[in-house]
Amino acid sequence: MLKAIIIYHTCSGNTKLLAEKIKERLESLNIEIKIFQDTNFQEIDSIKKFDIIGLGSPTHYYHIAKIFKEFLQKINNFNLRDKKLIAFATGSAKSSPPKICNDIVKVMKQTGIQTIAKIGCVKKPTKDINSEIEGCISKEIFKI
């Protein structure tokens, strides 16, 4: 069974809601999943044990949240070559989430992790986001 971890930062709660929707999708594919807010995730080295790593941030002044970027810098030295990345983000402007997803991918690039999905939404996730998540995260990606 594949194992996934989702780690996110949130201020307003929107990124947490998006993380929970991604979690629901992974569970529907029978993937074992753990979810943490970055400030509650202490076992940094354990990230290497997971097959799928979801990393999400809200937009702060058109950048990754500073505290989350500091978290990413703690793990961007790891060898994650056989791992898959789901980058996700929220923001108040339509252009913000895609930029933040790309920034997360850039920070994680040196780990060798393979990006399989970039998911973003403006403000609070709505029901419409479910179909986007299903389209981005399919069982074919994992060869289940």
Image: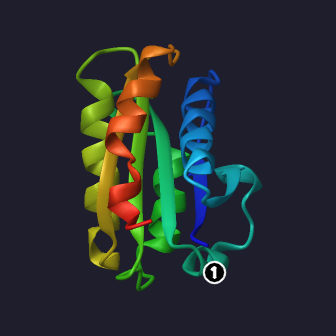
Q: Position of residue 96 (x, y in %)?
A: 29, 26
The reply to whether residue 11 is visible in this rendering is: yes
Dot 1: element: helix
Q: Could you tell me how many numbered marks the image carries?
A: 1
Q: Amino acid at mark 1?
A: Asp
Colouring convention used in this rendered image of the protein: rainbow
Residue at x 30%, y 78% (from the top left corner): 112
* Horizontal relation, residue 103 to residue 7: left or right: left
Quadrant where the C terminus is found in the figure: bottom left
Q: Position of residue 125 (x, y in %)?
A: 50, 19
Q: Position of residue 12 (x, y in %)?
A: 62, 21
* Horizontal relation, residue 95 to residue 48: left or right: left
Residue at x 57%, y 70% (from the top left corner): 2
Residue extending furthest toward the bottom: 79
Between 112 and 40, which is closer to the camera in this rendering?
112
Residue at x 41%, y 35% (from the top left corner): 133
Q: Position of residue 72 (x, y in %)?
A: 47, 61
The reply to whether residue 123 is visible in this rendering is: no
Residue at x 64%, y 24% (from the top left corner): 13
Please say if 49 is above or below 27. below
Which of the 4 image quarters holds residue 83? bottom left
Crowd tier of the residue under label 1, counting other residues whose Cα lies within 10 Å: few below 14, some 14–19, many 20 or above: few
Between 65 and 18, which is closer to the camera in this rendering?
18
Which of the 4 image quarters holds residue 17? top right
Q: Which residue is mark 1?
A: 45
Quadrant where the N terminus is found in the figure: bottom right
